[in-house]
Image (cartoon, grey):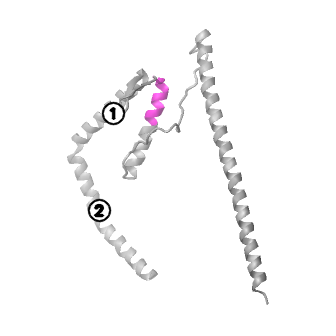
Amino acid sequence: MADYLKRAISDLSKRHADIKPVADSKKKENRELQRHALLELETKRRVGVSIASKRAMAGYVFNDKQGHQHNVVPIHEGNAEDVVKHYETARKRAMNEKAALQFHRFDGEGRVYQRIHSERDFTGAEGKTRKKGFDVIMQAIATHKAEKKAAMEQATRERRKELADHYRTVITELVLRRTLSRP
């Protein structure tokens, strides 16, 4: 069986080697023929990303499927850049893997982007107000991480106890069988 598989893989590798140069030249030819259309699509995509980024920095109102309105607060320019950078990375990875880029529904999990501004950016009362807001956000993140870690540790502790009880039961049954099977 193993020899059959090795031969099949070898045959497929040889056929692939014969087809690869033809496929590569065809790709290059198609890229050249569609260069203007691809450039136009890329330009439209970049404009769309730029518009979405500016919209996020300005804040907006979102209407969900049920018709409810939700205010989306504006984000800082630096944070918008980080989000776009993350999108570009995911997009490139999806293209390399020949997969579709999909966005999941927001469930409260994810990244928090916050750039720390120095005292020179915000002085006086404004600086203190912004620092208080930042401290609240960082405290909420730390609390969430601690709660998540405690829940995982508790689940692990409970699972270990369940496994230990199960093993004790199985060992006891095996010992009983062995004892009963002796003459």
Lateral position of residue 142 relative to residue 86, left or right: right
Q: Image height check: is 81 above or below 166?
A: above
Q: Which residues are magenta?
A: 74-85
The answer to which of 139 and 176 lies nearer the viewer is: 176
Question: Which percent across, then down, holds residue 3?
Answer: 44, 82
Q: Residue at x 23, y 47 (%)?
A: 32
Single out the mark in the foreground, 1 or 2. Answer: 1
Near mark 1 (Cα within 10 A), the count class, few <14, some 14-19 or many ≥20, is: few
The main secondary structure of the magenta stretch is helix
Q: CA distance from mark 1 to mark 2?
A: 33 Å
Q: Which residue is mark 1?
A: 46
Q: Which residue is mark 2?
A: 21
* Disc with the residue nearer the chain's start (1 vs 2): 2
Res. 120 image quadrant: top right
Tell whether label 2 touches label 1 (CB within 8 Å). no
Q: Residue furthest bottom?
A: 183
Q: Amino acid at mark 1?
A: Arg
Where is the N terminus found, in terms of image quarters?
bottom left
The answer to which of 37 and 124 lies nearer the viewer is: 124
Q: Does 80 appear in magenta? A: yes
Res. 68 image quadrant: top left
Q: Image height check: is 61 above or below 5?
A: above
Q: Amino acid at mark 2?
A: Pro
Where is the C terminus found, in terms of image quarters?
bottom right
